[in-house]
Amino acid sequence: MSDSRISDWSNYWTGRVAKQAGAALVGVGIETDATLAALWARVFKGLPPETRVLDLACGAGAALKAAARAGLTDLTGLDMVADAIVSLQRELPQARGVVAPANKTGLTDNRFDLIVSQFGFEYAGAEETAHEIGRILAPGGRFAAICHYADGAIEQECQGRIDQLKEIEDSAFIPRGKDLFRATYATMNTATKEESARAVAIANEKSDAFKPALRRLIAVARNKRLNGLAGHLYQGAAQLFERRSAYALADVEAWLDGMQGELDAYAGRMHSMVESALDASQVSAVLDTLKAAGFEPATPEEVKLSGSEQPAAWFLRAGTQGQVLA
């Protein structure tokens, strides 16, 4: 994953840990989907409590929570973002946390009995990470992962959000909004009638230029099929405008700049989810790599999330021959 994509995910976890970003920009996604929970119950069923479990690119530890519910106690989560580990240990204090990329963990050979991942290991490069999994998985160990499915339901949802973000960008709402705020604040700080008249005339011009951007943003916000990003931006800007006498212009501009940064990072995360989705040939390459390391793959399964008729994920498994997960 590129440095810019890592920064985009750091933005997500920082916001989630701080609980400061809007729900349109930071949320828990599908971590609690019932179909995924059932798959993890299947993975962990009947395993000894002392089974050494590693969750690669763990995020908040959805898979590890399932392991804990099944009675497993030796739990480790690894993620490239430090705030993801903060979130993991906030929700699962007994888990150890490691900050490292999934393809270069720095962990010792043959360290774990079971390695799992939920929408994670593929971000670091699925085949490269498979080599790392083969290295740190103990003889007799097992691997199970839920990963992104190319052209599946999640990828299509992400692409829809990318399209909406492009519409927000094309509306020019933020730059034209900044122009309007500056002009409006200028009318509040005039010393003479002449200065006031000039300031009002400029503000009216900026208002006229802003109206098409506002209409475009509202049109995007009314598209109920997509995420509520446009509405979040509109409502925040409207509140600032209505209460502008209570804010300094610098604070308003900082909020708009911050929203632009949040939207850019959100777009980066959506692109990374699309880019990490695996097709059948990539899945085969991952399983072949694990097989070469001594771990026999099971037939990959297509996963449909609750309420969906379209595949959204792959369920991959491998283990020592005769010990593949059920």
Image (spheres, rainbow, N blue to C red):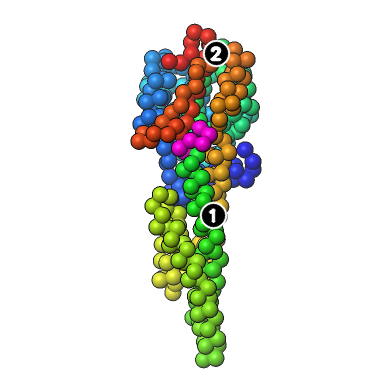
* Magenta segment main secondary structure: loop
Could you tell me which residue is drawn at 41 percent across and 31 percent down?
304
Res 259 seen here: no
Among all residues in the image, which is located at the extreme top? 322
| Quadrant holding the C terminus | top left
Q: Which mark is residue 141?
A: none
Q: Which amino acid does label 1 sit on?
A: Lys
Residue under label 1: 166
Highlighted magenta segment, given as a residue range: 149-154
SS state under label 1 = helix
The outermost residue toward the bottom is 193
Across and down, in percent, residue 112 comes to: 53, 19
- Which residue corresponds to mark 2? 296
**How many labels were placed on the picture?**
2
The quarter of the image holding the N terminus is top right
Q: Position of residue 16 (x, y in %)?
A: 46, 45
Along the line of sight, which residue is nearer the eye, 147 or 6? 147
